[in-house]
């Protein structure tokens, strides 16, 4: 059975002139406007995301209503393009989880390139020789929970690097000052 064709009168789709190289009788469909998240909604979404990264349908409706309440101006009704729906919330959460995973993979690759073996977000060691026990050489006094995840380790390393750079700049300016004083 073939799917029903999309009616051209549908307001979501509009017929546009064909590209110059197209043959006669063809047309290209254009989607409607793209939704842009407002800063107020993003703050609401982030707060809910920090609580639970996998909201159910009822929670997504609650988040959508909270966003709509934040952006709606008194006496004005939100247009269909401005209104936040549970589907938009669902897609934002999926994209946010994907972005976190992508960043964790990048940070793990950076740490590994510096010779630091880390647990990847998938839970597997990034080293080639996976034996199922990455901490076998440690004594029993340190537990597995003492190890930081790659994201917090990368953040801590960035803070240390920032401090070192600041001290180096300060030391370099003091060295220049001392060199000028010696003259």
Image (spheres, rainbow, N blue to C red):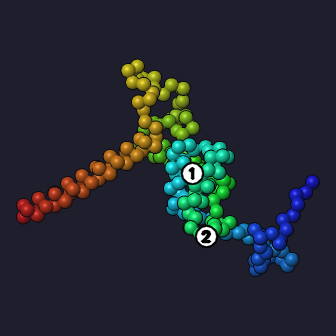
* Location of residue 19 (image quadrant): bottom right
Closer to the camera in the image, 67 or 30: 67
- Residue 96 got which mark? 1
- Residue 76 got which mark? 2
Q: Residue furthest top?
A: 140
Question: On the rendered structure, is 114 left or right of 81?
Answer: left
Q: State the residue at coordinates (83%, 77%).
A: 23
Q: Secondary structure at mark 1?
A: helix
Which label sits in the foreground, 1 or 2? 2
Residue 142 position in % (x across, y down): 39, 24
Residue 53 position in % (x across, y down): 57, 44
Question: On the rendered structure, is 35 left or right of 49?
Answer: right
Question: On the rendered image, what quadrant is the N terminus found in?
Answer: bottom right
> Can the viewer see residue 172 in this picture?
yes
* Location of residue 83 (image quadrant): bottom right
Residue 108 position in % (x across, y down): 48, 43
Q: State the residue at coordinates (52%, 34%).
A: 125
């Amino acid at each position: 059975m073939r799917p029903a064709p999309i009616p051209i009168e549908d307001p979501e789709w509009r017929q546009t002139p064909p590209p110059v190289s197209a043959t006669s009788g063809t047309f290209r469909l254009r989607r409607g406007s793209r939704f842009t998240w407002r800063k107020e909604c993003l703050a609401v979404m982030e707060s809910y995301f920090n609580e639970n990264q996998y909201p159910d349908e009822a929670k997504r409706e609650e988040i959508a209503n909270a966003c709509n309440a934040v952006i709606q101006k008194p006496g004005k009704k939100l247009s269909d393009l401005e209104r936040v729906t549970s589907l938009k919330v669902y897609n934002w959460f999926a994209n946010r989880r994907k972005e976190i995973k992508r960043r964790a993979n990048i940070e793990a690759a950076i740490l590994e390139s510096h010779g630091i073996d880390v647990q990847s977000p998938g839970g597997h060691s990034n080293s080639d020789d996976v034996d199922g026990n990455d901490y076998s050489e440690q004594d029993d006094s340190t537990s597995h929970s003492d190890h930081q995840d790659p994201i917090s380790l990368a953040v801590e390393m960035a803070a240390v690097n920032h401090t070192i750079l600041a001290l180096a700049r300060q030391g370099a300016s003091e060295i220049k000052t001392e060199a000028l004083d010696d003259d």
